[in-house]
Image (cartoon, rainbow, N blue to C red):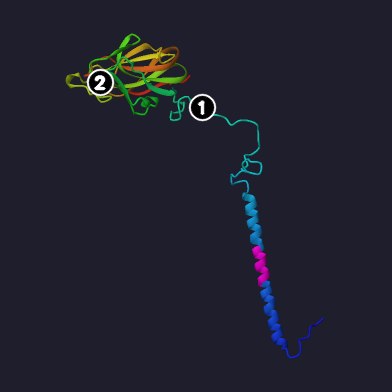
Amino acid sequence: MAIEPAAGVDAGALGGVASRLYSRNVVCRKAVEASFGLLLFACSITTSLEGLSGQPGPDGGSDVDAGPDTGASPPIEENDAGADAAPVVCEGGRLRAIAAFEATPAAATNGRACEVENVLVKDGLVAGLDAINYEGDARLDVQFVYGCVGVEFDRDILTAFVSLAASGNACGRACTGSQCGTGRDAAVFAGPARDTVKLVQKMQLESTIVESSVAVPNGTRVVVVCRLANSADRDDVAVDAIVAACK
């Protein structure tokens, strides 16, 4: 059914008004649709983010989804050597120790070990075994010693490898005069625990680091290297590494 314009109303003008009204209606309808779409999108995001806020839910617990409940507790990682210790590694036929420690006997007040952690890895960084003055040596097993350093393994070993050199100044007390270049001796001890080591070998040292193999008793887990109780004016001991043969 056609709609006739009222008397006095120009049909062309009426058409223009209708066209403008239609365009505005379309624009308004699209704006409403767009607004409604944004509203739906916002609602969707809000719904998706619910449960990620960490706020307590209706039952008093957290809304965070922790995944399916398996009934099992999470595993606890343990490291006997401490968080900063090097992991146990067996490579190139060598087993790394799990801990390094100063093994100087308490009565050896003249002895000192320094940078003891350097003996865990053969890398040219050394620990030092020094004599600070002329008194205060002590006996370890049957041997008088000054400074000592030791390592502990996580399993029994049969062969230790010690990388040693003579040093004119291992920890701050340098050799003097004609005494430098003398007293280049070290002793190796081994046993199942730190307080049960026994003397297994004595050796002469060179000016450069040399790795030597040392047979140790069954059940050995601790190896100790000491500077002998020579005069504080004589050479000291540098220890690059104390490791073991991989079985």
Examine the rendered structure and indicate whether residue 89 appears above or below residue 201.
Answer: below
Q: What number of labels is visible?
A: 2
Q: Residues within 10 Å of mark 2 (few under 14, many from 20)?
A: many
Pick out the residue farthest to the bottom: 8
Q: Position of residue 99 (x, y in %)?
A: 42, 23
Quarter-of-image position of residue 118 = top left
- Is label 2 in a helix, a strand or a loop? loop
Magenta residues, start to end: 27-35
Please tell me which residue lies in front, 226 or 95.
226
Examine the rendered structure and indicate whether residue 65 appears above or below residue 168.
Answer: below
Q: Position of residue 162 (x, y in %)?
A: 36, 20
Residue denoted by label 2: 132
Q: Residues within 10 Å of mark 1 (few under 14, many from 20)?
A: few
Please tell me which residue lies in front, 67 or 55.
55
Residue denoted by label 1: 78
Q: Earlier in the sequence, mark 2 or mark 1?
A: 1
- Is label 1 in a helix, a strand or a loop? loop
Examine the rendered structure and indicate whether residue 9 appears above or below residue 113.
Answer: below
Identified by mark 1, the residue type is Glu
Q: CA distance from mark 2 to mark 1?
A: 39 Å
Residue at 47% x, 24% y is 80
